Image: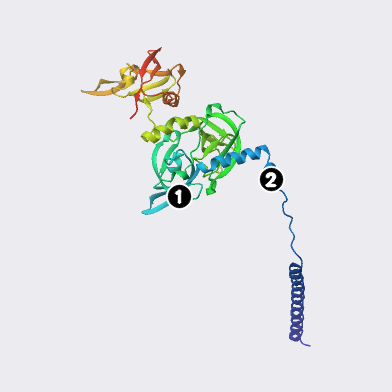
Amino acid sequence: MNKSTLIFCCFTAVAASLVTSIFLERLHFDTFLGASQNARRSTPVHLAHTKIDNAAYLKGFTPEEQLNIQVYDQTSRSVVYINTESRREFFFREAVAQGEGSGSILDKDGHILTNFHVVNGANAVQVTLFNGNSYSATLVGADVANDCAILKINAPEDELFPVCFGDSSRLKVGQKVYAIGNPFGLELTLSTGIVSSLNRSLPSQARFRMIRQVIQIDASINPGNSGGPLLDSHGEVIGMNVAIASRSGDSAGVGFAIPANTLTRIIPQLIQHGKVLRPNLGIEQVTHTDSGLLITRLQPGGPAEKAGLSSPKVVTKKRQQGPYVYEYQTLDRATADFIVGINGQDVKTVDDLLTIIETLSPGDTVQLVIMRNKKTFNVPIILGESE
C-alpha cells in the first residue's frame, strides 16, 4: 500500500465516523422530540387558578397598597402626556427634535400646567389625555423665573378632570408623596417616595434668579416626568416635578418639585395676562459689593428715583495732554446708594432682593434699608408695576 492510498483510507474512515455520529445524534433528538410531542398530546394541562373572589382579593390589600391605588385612581385622569416638536436650521438643513413631558389639567376650559423647559422653543405641542385622545396645544403664558408654563387645548369638558391643589406650607419631611408622569414616554406611571427635605433652591433659567422653597423628594423621577404633579396622600397637588440631581440623567433618588403655593400664586396671572405681573422697584441695575448692592442705574421717573434714591452721577472732567485739554465724562460712584436690607430682612444678593419683592404686589409699600455715606436708614418706596 502506497502513501496516497493510506491517506485516502484514513480520510474515508474519519468521514464515515463523523457521518455515523451525526446520524445517531439526530436519531436520538428525533426520538426525544417525538416523545415530547406525544407527551404534550396525551397529557392534559392543569394549572392552578385562584380561588380568591374579587371582594376577598381587594380586601387583602395592605393599607399602604389601598392608599396607593386610591390616589392613582383619583388623580391619574388629570395627568397628560406632552409631546413637542422643534425645528432648527442645521448646516442649511432643517433638523427636527422631539421632546416629551407631563402636565396637569387645571380646569374645564382646557388649561394645562407644565414646566417651561418642556415647551421652550417648541414649534408644535401635542397633549394626550388619559383616554388616548390627543389635541394640539397653544402656549397661553410662561414664567421663566419659576419654570412654569400654561398650555390650552380644545377638548370636551367630559374628558377634562382638573387637579386639586393642596397647601405646600404644611408639608413635613418624611411624609409620603406620589409622582405621576410619563417617564421615557411610558404614560401615566406612578412612583412613590417621601419628602426628603424642604426649602431647597434651584438655579432658574432667568438671569440672577433662583427657584425658592423647592421640595426635595426621593420618588423616582426620570426624563418625561417634568411638569407632572407631585401629590400627597389626599390626592392633592403639593408640587410640580421639575428636575433631578443625577450624573447619568436617570433617577438617582434625588428629585425636586416646585411647591404648590408658588404655583397657585402665579397660575391665575399666567392665564389672565400671559405673564406674572411682578411689582417694580424702579431699580434697573445693581452691582454686588462687600458693602451691599450698589445701585448703578435707576429707572427714570421710577419708584426708587421718586423716593430719593441715588445712583452714580455722570460728571465731566478735564485732562491735559501736552498743549491740549480734553473733556471726558465718568461715573462718580460715591454718590450711589447701597441696598443692605428690605422690610427688616438682610439683602446680600440680587436674588435675595427679587425674592422678597416678588411676594408683594404693585401698590404695596416697602421699607428699603439704604447705606449712604456709611450711614444706614430706611426709605419707604411704593412699588410700581413691571412692564
Q: Is mark 1 on a helix, strand or loop?
A: strand
> Residue drawn 75% across and 86% down?
5
Residue 75, how many percent across, how many down?
A: 54, 40
**Label 2 crowding class (10 Å Cα cut-off): few <14, some 14-19, many 20+?**
few
Colour approach in the figure = rainbow
Residue 315, how many percent across, how many down?
A: 27, 20
Q: In this view, does 38 lie to the left or right of 116?
A: right
Residue 119, how many percent across, how many down?
A: 43, 43
Separation of marks 1 and 2 at Cα, in angstroms:
35 Å
Is any atom of residue 246 visible in this view?
A: no
Q: Is mark 2 on a helix, strand or loop?
A: helix
Q: Name the residue under label 1.
A: 134
Residue 206, how many percent across, how many down?
A: 42, 34
Q: Name the residue under label 2.
A: 57
255 lies above or below 12: above
Report the amino acid beneath label 1: Ser
Quadrant assignment for the C terminus: top left
Quadrant assignment for the N terminus: bottom right
* Residue in the foreground of this view, choosing between 54 and 60: 54
Which of the two labelled residues, at mark 1 and mark 2, occupies the earlier sequence position? 2
Which residue extends farthest left?
323
Report the amino acid beneath label 2: Tyr
377 lies above or below 290: above
233 lies above or below 368: below
Task: Mark 1 and mark 2 in contact? Answer it, CB < 8 Å.
Answer: no
Is any atom of residue 20 visible in this view?
A: yes
> Residue drawn 59% across and 32% down?
195
62 lies above or below 18: above
Q: What mark, if any, has residue 213 been given in the picture?
A: none
